């Protein structure tokens, strides 16, 4: 009979060579990302339930339930109507040669606002309705926030040339097919430092 060494079927706490299946830092990072996703959802659910309980205490259970249904139905109707309107405005802007950034941002605000109204909840419904009604007021700070985010991630946010001269405050190019931004490199010299 030959004697073979005993090899455990499962690795120990550190695994072979002191390494587990995942480095400890990546597990912590994954847990932190999960917590960042789950915690706001849990807080949102608690706030919504509290709001429903408070409103049901003020106006009654049946009117509160009807209010929730009305918010969902209103969100669906507004998503269809305002979404089509924003899409048409963005297409008209693109056809006329001006950048459709404001129209596209309006479309995003419509989708987010209507989506908040569709999701059951009183706080969501109020926030969604405010977002839909106050789109012109919300658009400027939201554009500034998105521009700052884009710059943080290295997305260019310069000015777009417009067909009539001047520029608009968004990035890209519109109405000018003859302008290509970049660097000319001579193949013999290579890129300049």
Image (tube, rainbow, N blue to C red):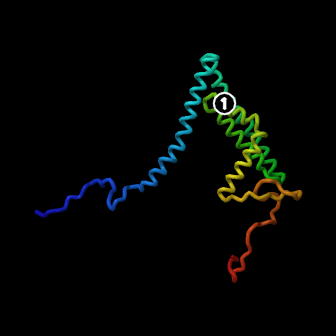
Q: Nearer the viewer, residue 176 or 47?
A: 47
Q: Quadrant of residue 122?
A: top right
Q: Which quarter of the rendered picture does the C terminus lie within?
A: bottom right
Give the answer, above or below, for where 187 lies relative to 50: below
Quarter of the picture holding the N terminus = bottom left
- Left or right of 28: which side holds 171? right
Please tell me which residue lies in front, 75 or 38: 38
Among all residues in the image, which is located at the extreme bottom?
188
| Residue 173 image offset from top left, x and y in percent | 78, 59
Quadrant hosting residue 172: bottom right
On the image, the x and y values in percent for residue 12 come to 30, 54
Mark count? 1
In the foreground, 61 or 99: 61
* Crowd band around label 1 with a 10 angstrom C-alpha radius: few (<14), some (14–19), many (20+): many
Q: Is residue 92 above or below residue 43?
A: below
In what element is the residue under mark 1? helix
Q: Residue farthest to the right?
A: 164
* In the image, farthest residue toward the left: 1
| Residue under the point 71% across and 39% down | 110
Question: Which residue, given by chain and number where applicable, does mark 1 sit on?
Answer: 125
Residue 31 place in picture, x, y as percent: 47, 47
Where is residue 119? Give x, y as percent.
61, 33
**For residue 25, above or below residue 55:** below
For the point 77% across and 66% down, which residue is it?
180
């Amino acid at each position: 009979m030959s004697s073979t060494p005993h090899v455990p079927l499962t690795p120990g706490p550190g695994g072979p060579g002191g390494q587990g299946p995942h480095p400890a830092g990546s597990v912590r990072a994954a847990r932190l990302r999960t917590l960042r996703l789950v915690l706001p959802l849990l807080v949102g659910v608690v706030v919504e339930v509290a709001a429903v309980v408070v409103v049901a205490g003020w106006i009654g259970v049946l009117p509160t339930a009807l209010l929730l249904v009305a918010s969902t139905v209103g969100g669906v109707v507004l998503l269809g109507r305002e979404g089509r309107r924003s899409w048409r405005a963005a297409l008209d802007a693109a056809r006329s040669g001006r950048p459709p950034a404001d129209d596209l941002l309006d479309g995003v605000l419509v989708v987010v606002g209507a989506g908040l109204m569709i999701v059951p909840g009183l706080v969501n419904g109020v926030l969604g309705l405010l977002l839909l009604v106050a789109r012109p007021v919300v658009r400027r700070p939201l554009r500034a926030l998105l521009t700052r985010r884009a710059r943080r991630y290295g997305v260019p946010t310069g000015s777009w040339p417009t067909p009539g001269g001047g520029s608009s405050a968004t990035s890209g190019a519109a109405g000018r097919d003859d302008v290509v931004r970049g660097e000319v490199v001579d193949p013999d010299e290579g890129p300049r430092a």
